[in-house]
Image (spheres, rainbow, N blue to C red):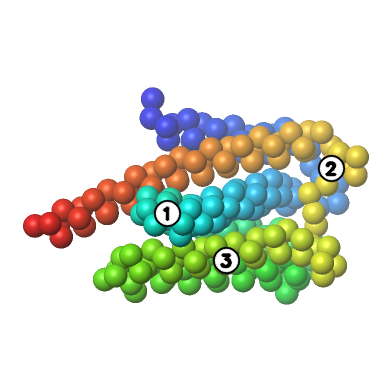
Amino acid sequence: MKPWFFISLALGIAFSIIFFYAPMEKTQGIVQKIFYIHVSSALTMYVGFFIAFIASIIHLYKRESRYYWMSKSAIEVGYVFCCIVLLTGPVWAKPIWGAYWTWEPRLTTTFILWLIYTSYLLFQSYLKENQKKAEVISSIIAVVAFFDVPLIHLSVKLWRGVHPTVLRNKEGLPPSMSLTLVITFFVMIGLFAYLLRQRFFLEKLEQQILQLKENQ
């Protein structure tokens, strides 16, 4: 069977667990179930950008294009999950805070991260004539951009934001909710790994085609 079949099946199971197994939160109601998608996407986004961070450092040291391809692929896939975070957040915030968006520290730093990686993706189309230069500059941007990730994670404590944090069992998160979050996270990681593999393959194929054209 194709990998996408297992990914689709896993997503179906995760959504079933979210809506039929995880209990309804007493004060927030059904809208709280966005929590599982929102938090899992945020954690997956962190993983994607961390992979890009490490791959970019290795590329700057070894100057091997395959590490740049990995970094670029991880950023593109991580960017998708960043968009999911920014879309699901307001949907969750409106019934709870009474507004889709507030310039709360965690929201603001996440939006800044989105802007940085949006600029990174736009930058890719401007330096195609000098691929080696583009790889180096892109890797530098990827390394610098990642430093916003710890700020996002620590922003609630650093600036006393009102954004909720993931509660541990001893602080009130029921085991069923914890299990649902863990399952959803691993499903998201599986989806990320599949998309990363596909994107890396396409990037490698594209570069091979460009090399063939140059050699003709």
Please rate how many residues cluster around mark 1, counting C-alpha atoms within 10 Å: few if below 14, some from 14 to 19, many from 20.
Answer: few
Residue 80 in view of the camera: no
Specify the quadrant that holds the N terminus: top left
- Labels 2 & 3 near each other (Cβ < 8 A): no
Residue 148, horizontal then vertical, whole percent: 65, 65
Please report contact status of discs 1 and 3: CB closer than 8 Å, yes or no.
Answer: no
In the rendered image, residue 171, in percent from the top left (x then y), is placed at 90, 44
Is 50 left or right of 125, judged from the image as shown?
right
User: Residue 44: which disc?
Assistant: none
Q: Amino acid at mark 1?
A: Lys
Badge 3 density bin: few <14, some 14–19, many ≥20, Cα 10 Å:
some
> What residue is shown with label 2?
168
Q: Amino acid at mark 3?
A: Ala
Q: Are marks 1 and 2 in contact (CB under 8 Å)?
A: no
* Horizontal side of residue 166 vs 200, given as left or right: right
Residue found at x 71% / y 64% = 151
Per the image, the residue denoted by label 3 is: 145
Comes first in the chain, label 2 or label 3: 3
Residue at figure coordinates x 37%, y 68% from the top left? 134
